[in-house]
Each structure stands twice: as structure tokens, then as C-alpha cells.
Image: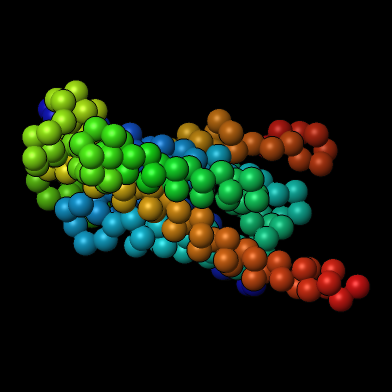
Amino acid sequence: MSIILKLFVFPISLIIICLGINTILGGHITPGGGFQGGAMIAGGLIFCIIVYGLKESPFKITHNFLSGMESAGALGYVFLGLAGLFTSGFFLYNLGVDLYGITPAVFQTLFNYPDPTSAGIIPYLNYVVGIKVMVGLSAVVIAFLESDKILGENEQ
Amino acid sequence: MIFYIGPLVLGFFLGFIIGTRIKPSPESKLKFDKKVYAIVFIVAIGVAYLLGAFPYYQDIPLASGYASAIIGIIIGKLLFGRSKSSEGQIS
């Protein structure tokens, strides 16, 4: 890649990643959400990986990091679902809002997202979905870029 | 002044995680030093101001999640984003 691209892509990818995080955090009141924001973050990471290459990329994304983040996102989603199931009897019940008034007030305080909209667990669900999508899309591109190495090993 | 800690904390946390993955590569001839992060921070605050706060948010006229994300990235990079280069120096 040209030197101009290499100079500009890393700072711009940081701006894109922040925009993705902002999209995730506003998923309950503005267009966007976990998938869209996660795809934007992955776009920033992929931008760097494509331009600099896997070895020279400023973002060192290891297999352990990818698997850890993927697991954290999935477990966070399941945890939020099970928290609703055990306290109200409904999987993914919105404990923070508690429309039916069937859970103790302490859970409503604990699971309510602290912002003026009081959206309950919806922003947290956006957050964990965003983490999963970020990791999933990045992993696809990294796997494609490493396919030459994998195919070469299989041919030998 | 009211501060809504939801976007501040979650934005900082995700930015921090991503910031920890930024490490200098010994193979690369390009070095992104402090000046680059300072410029990115200033630009990001400008972008956050132009984005504006979310609807119903009345704390600050900035996209608070955006601003906390760039702060998280820079702090994550400063704390954990250093790696030992081939000469044994921490860069």
C-alpha cells in the first residue's frame, strides 16, 4: 500500500472505532445498535489490517483476544437472559424497566441503564451483541488473510 | 450538572479494551508517537461536538460515549499497549 494510506489509515480507524462505540451506546434511542456499531468497529480494525497487513498492523489481534471477547459477549447475553428468567420467570425479561412489576426493586436499580431514557437491559444487550459482531467480522477477515498460509501448509 | 454514567463507563471500557491491542510492531517503519494521539484526540473531540448529545441527554453538548471511547483508547494504549521491541526497549 502507498505511504499516504499508511500515514492516514490508523488515525482514521481510531475515529471510525469511536463512532462505532457511540453507535452501540445510542442503540436504544437512535438508529443503530449492537450489530451496526460492532460492524463499524470491525470496519476500523479491518481497515488497518488490510492496509498494513497482519504483521505490521498497529492492532495486534490475537486468537486468545478474539476467543475471549467472543465468549464474553455470548456469556453476557446469556447472563442477562438468565437473570430475567430466575427473577421473573421470563427469559430476557427487562429487569431494569419491570413493566409487570414482578421483580424486587433492587433488581430494577441494578439492571437499569443509567441515562435519562431508563431503557433497562436493552443498552447492555446492544453492548454484548456489539462485542460479538466486532469479533466475528474481524475474525472472518483475519481468517481470509491467513488462508494462504493455511492452504500452503495443507499442500505440503 | 448531571452526568449520565452509562455511556461514559461503557464507552470508556470498550475503548480501553481496544486500546490495549494497539502495540508497535518492530517490522513496521511507521511509528505513531504521542503527537498522532494528541491530534486524534483533538479531532475526536471536534467530531463528538459535531455529533452532539443523544436525544433526551442534557448533560454536555458532546457525544459523551464518543469522547469517553477516545479517552479509553488512549489510556488503554498508554497502560497496556506497550510491547518490548526486538532491542529490548519499551516503545
Residue found at the far top of this picture: A106
In the shown orientation, is residue B35 left or right of residue B49? right
How many discs appear? Answer: 0
- In the rendered image, residue A150, in percent from the top left (x then y), is placed at 77, 68
Q: Nearer the viewer, residue A10 or B21?
A: B21
In the shown orientation, is residue B91 left or right of residue B62? right
In the shown orientation, is residue A91 left or right of residue B52? right
Which residue does the image show at 48% across and 34% down from the upper left? B75
Against B78, is A59 above or below?
below
In this rendering, does residue A19 appear at all?
no
Residue found at the far right of this picture: A156
- In the rendered image, residue B56, in percent from the top left (x then y), is placed at 9, 46
- In the rendered image, residue A56, in percent from the top left (x then y), is placed at 69, 57
- In the rendered image, residue B61, in percent from the top left (x then y), is placed at 17, 44
Against B66, is B88 above or below?
above
In the shown orientation, is residue B55 left or right of residue A21? left
Which residue does the image show at 41% across and 62% down from the upper left? A39
Q: Nearer the viewer, residue B21 or A81?
A: A81
Which residue does the image show at 58% across and 67% down from the upper left? A141
**Quarter containing the C terminus of chain A:** bottom right
Which residue does the image show at 14% across and 39% down from the upper left? A97
The answer to which quarter of the image holds residue A120 is: top left
Q: Nearer the viewer, residue B22 or A78?
A: A78
**Quarter containing the N terminus of chain A:** bottom right
